[in-house]
């Protein structure tokens, strides 16, 4: 079974957590300070872009929405050669708070994507907890985001939004039928 | 003094439980598969250890029919890392600060000779 599971408890109601993870069009501090675009309906686009919109770091397509409990979408790193994978968010009430479980599945093997996601999800979930419980991330995280923005001129062409959208138009981000 | 990471420290204090996490690092295992990896330990003891790991959320159990798949969840370990070791992140940030200063101010650094010194900026991360 090639899938990964990440879980964290957040001291806030399910609705509040859902509101935060499904935000669209604004800066998403937990997701490396990118702009999250999320068209919350099956077939809708998922994108994580640089603040100026010129680069796209993550792309996907919404598969299933059961507000405020469950969100399933496909997932690719556009600069990696791997086929789309599948991300499932599950929000479960737990006491006065919410248990958040992210399952990342349908890796074609121990691919580059499979390796790379361990550098993301643990940090992302910890930061969602921090943002929702305290209202903000720490100054160290913000400093890093500012610097990542300032350094965006070093990013490869393969991450450019125009290049990626042309690729997606030619080949939609669906997961292979079997997993 | 206690916080919600206490169960994580308790779970990690046992060599047997750390060995179980090492097995799960390679991928999810059913409880049966996990027990087979530790022939000297009773299945009952393995299940008790799994209970402690689950309590600490280091293991997330996913049911699939009659099977119970145990997944490693690295998020609590990440939280320990951020809580105790995050100064490392600040050093990385400081490194980039000097890069930014070079890029915006002094122009490209000379390939030979001149070195920029990196001074860590103390940045406290709110937890």
Image (spheres, rainbow, N blue to C red):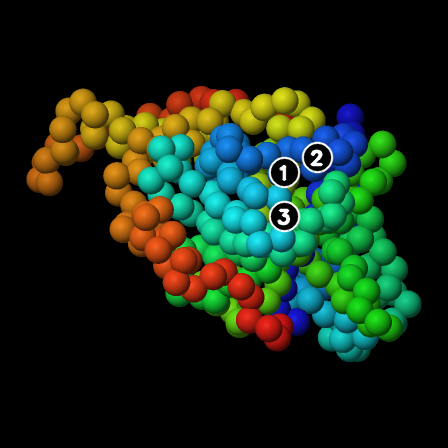
Residue pointed to by mark 2: A17
Mark sitting earlier along the chain (2/3): 2
CA gap, disc 2 and disc 1: 6 Å
Are the residues flagged by discs 3 and 1 from a single subunit?
yes
Residue pointed to by mark 3: A41
Using the image as rendered, state which of residue A23 and residue A2 is in the foreground. A23
Question: Picture quarter containing residue B45?
Answer: bottom right
CA gap, disc 2 and disc 3: 18 Å
Residue A168 falls left or right of residue B77: left
Residue pointed to by mark 1: A21
Q: Nearer the viewer, mark 3 or mark 1?
A: 3
Q: Nearer the viewer, mark 2 or mark 3?
A: 3
The chain letter under disc 2 is: A
Q: Going 78% across and 54% down the picture, which residue do you hit? A: B53
Q: Going 11% across and 40% down the picture, which residue do you hit? A: B111
Q: Can residue B99 be seen in this view?
A: yes
Question: Picture quarter containing residue A17?
Answer: top right
The secondary element bearing badge 1 is classed as helix
Residue A148 vertical position relative to residue B21 in the rendered view, above or below: above
Residue A24 coordinates in the image, percent (x, y): 55, 35
Q: Residues within 10 Å of mark 1 (few under 14, many from 20)?
A: some
Q: Residues within 10 Å of mark 2 (few under 14, many from 20)?
A: many
């Amino acid at each position: 079974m090639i899938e990964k599971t990440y879980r964290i408890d957040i001291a806030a109601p399910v609705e509040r957590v859902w509101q935060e993870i499904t935000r669209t069009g604004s800066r998403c501090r937990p997701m490396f300070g990118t702009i999250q675009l999320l068209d919350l309906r099956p077939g809708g686009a998922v994108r994580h872009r640089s603040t100026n919109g010129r680069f796209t770091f993550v792309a996907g397509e919404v598969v299933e929405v059961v507000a405020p409990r469950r969100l399933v979408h496909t997932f690719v790193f556009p600069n990696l050669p791997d086929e789309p994978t599948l991300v499932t968010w599950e929000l479960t009430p737990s006491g006065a708070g919410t248990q958040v479980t992210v399952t990342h599945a349908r890796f074609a093997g121990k691919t580059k994507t499979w390796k790379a996601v361990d550098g993301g999800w643990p940090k992302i979930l910890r930061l969602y907890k921090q943002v929702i419980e305290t209202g903000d991330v720490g100054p160290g995280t913000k400093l890093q985001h500012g610097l990542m923005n300032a350094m965006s001129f070093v990013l490869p062409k393969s991450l450019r939004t125009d290049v990626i959208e042309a690729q997606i138009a030619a080949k939609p981000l669906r997961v292979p039928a079997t997993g | 003094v206690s916080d919600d990471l206490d169960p994580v420290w308790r779970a990690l204090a046992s060599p047997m439980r750390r060995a179980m996490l090492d097995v799960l690092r390679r991928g999810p295992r059913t409880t049966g598969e996990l027990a087979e990896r530790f022939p000297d330990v009773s299945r009952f003891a393995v299940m008790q250890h799994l209970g402690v790991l689950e309590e600490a959320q280091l293991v997330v159990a996913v049911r699939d029919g009659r099977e119970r798949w145990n997944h490693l969840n690295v998020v609590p370990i990440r939280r320990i890392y951020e809580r105790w070791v995050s100064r490392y992140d600040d050093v990385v940030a400081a490194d980039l600060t000097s890069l930014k200063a070079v890029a915006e101010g002094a122009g490209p650094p000379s390939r030979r000779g001149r070195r920029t010194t990196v001074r860590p900026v103390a940045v406290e991360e709110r937890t």
